[in-house]
Image (tube, coloured by chain):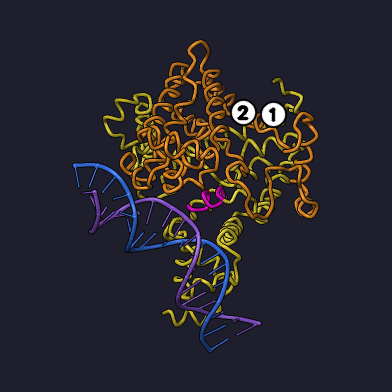
Chain colours: A orange, B yellow, C blue, D purple
Amino acid sequence: MADTLHRTPLTRDRILLAAVALADATGIQSLSMRNLAQDLGVVPMALYKHVANKDELLDGMIDVVVGEIDPPRQDTDWKQSVRLRILSARQMLIRHPWAPLAIESRNMATMAVLAYLDSVVATLRAGGFSTDLAHHVMHAMGSRILGFSQELFDASRRAGQTGVAEVDAPTGFPPEIAARFPHLAEISAAASHDDASTVGSGCDDQFEFEFALDLLLDGIDRLRQQGWTSSHRVR
Amino acid sequence: MADTLHRTPLTRDRILLAAVALADATGIQSLSMRNLAQDLGVVPMALYKHVANKDELLDGMIDVVVGEIDPPRQDTDWKQSVRLRILSARQMLIRHPWAPLAIESRNMATMAVLAYLDSVVATLRAGGFSTDLAHHVMHAMGSRILGFSQELFDASRRAGQTGVAEVDAPTGFPPEIAARFPHLAEISAAASHDDASTVGSGCDDQFEFEFALDLLLDGIDRLRQQGWTSSHRVR
DNA sequence: ACCTGAACACCGTTCAAGT
DNA sequence: ACCTGAACACCGTTCAAGT
């Protein structure tokens, strides 16, 4: 097995794909240069021929997954076009749960991310947004444009961990927690009841994501229709 | 100097405050058990008498800073009350730039965080929100309730880093990047022009935060007035 | 010139030895 | 019983030695 791996020559692409696969399978915490090298059947130092360091490896991995986001559709209005792309980005993040933390920890945009953001702005401008409003809209959407859900606590990011209480799965609210935080218990009970189709884990993440997304898109559309400008700024 | 530090007995509170101060000063990356111990003038192992491990240390630090968020005001309506608390949370995060990453990496709510969230839900319920709508609102607000800005790229999180391009400071868009991503260059130029008071770093973060916050609060208020329920759900 | 093993400077945490 | 130094099992990366 290590034999066949040795036969294929090591390339930057092979390293990046193996790194993505390893992060998908075992989480970003388990992704180390030494670990990745072992997966590829090479000595750790061999990786440094193709990537300068671990940060550059992460940048490459980000470019790989951002490249999986659907291209923009030209046959709909701006709202539907942006909406579908953001939902596509979200599907990508579901396939690669480590990506949000990796992207955030890098705090610099890679070329692939910049290209994606540029094309979203292009859709807005074509839809009649002023540069001014488009700018504020990009800020307001924030990382949601990349499919981030900004959940209060995201259990999918890390596996098992010693902790205090899980908010993510309100179904399993322990009684003593429910007693101390009655309002949280109340709304978490509402979540379990109003959606019979969701079994087990409580909240319907897809619905919550679209709820927030549409809240923003509707508000943004209203501003666009009103011809909003920065001069509306009162404070 | 180490003498005077040795005199004061080591307590959990002293450790937590020193850890917060160290993270404030040098960033979360520089916060190690060994480093913190040296700051306190004790041997690393001495810390483990008061905190079980590093995760528990982080939980304690989170409780310290979440405790700095203003208590709810009772003399206004729900919208103003929630708005002011979220802006207070944001001020806290500005004092402690490491906190967002720390809170996200923990992915479990500490008792202090749960208490804060519970009181926000209480304000919503008192303001006439159904448990159903309050639940979706909490999801839609996400970490913004804790003051998170969900910027696309947050330069304040990490210090200098080798990277590709900074999106955070659009004023300094290098020419070759501007040529490749014309729509991004266009809206970043708009940002610099429409606000003469912002010098240097380009965007007015406080304005962008309030813009997005008010967009959400206004949309939420509209749903509340309309008596929104989950049955509006079409898909 | 290329490859790579050993080494360096860290890390969180365990554990046993010293008091 | 308490405290703590040494040690363990990692990490990213440097560097010099071997081919």
- Residue type of the residue flagged with mark 1: Leu
- Residue type of the residue flagged with mark 2: Leu
For mark 2, give the secondary structure: helix
Cα distance, mark 2 to mark 1?
Answer: 9 Å
Mark number displayed over residue A215: 2
Tag 2 and tag 1, C-beta contact below 8 Å? yes
Which chain's residue wears label 1?
B
Instruction: Point out residue B144 in the picture as x, y percentages from the top left corner.
Output: 58, 42
Can you see residue B123?
yes
Which chain's residue wears label 2?
A
Residue for point 46% across, 75% down? B41
Q: Is residue B101 magenta?
A: yes
Q: Classify 10 Å Cα crowding around label 2: few (below 14), some (14-19), many (20 and above).
A: many
Instruction: Point out residue A28 in the picture as x, y percentages from the top left corner.
Output: 51, 44
Chief SS of the magenta region: helix
Above or below D12: residue A171: above
Above or below B14: residue B25: above
- Region in magenta: B97-105
Front-lying residue, A36 or B180: A36
Above or below A169: residue B34: below
For mark 1, give the secondary structure: helix
Q: Is residue B174 magenta?
A: no
Q: Is residue B68 left or right of residue A57?
A: right
Residue most extreme to the top = A75
Q: Which residue is mark 1?
A: B223
Co-location on one chain, circles 2 and 1: no
Instruction: Point out residue B48 in the picture as x, y percentages from the top left corner.
Output: 57, 69
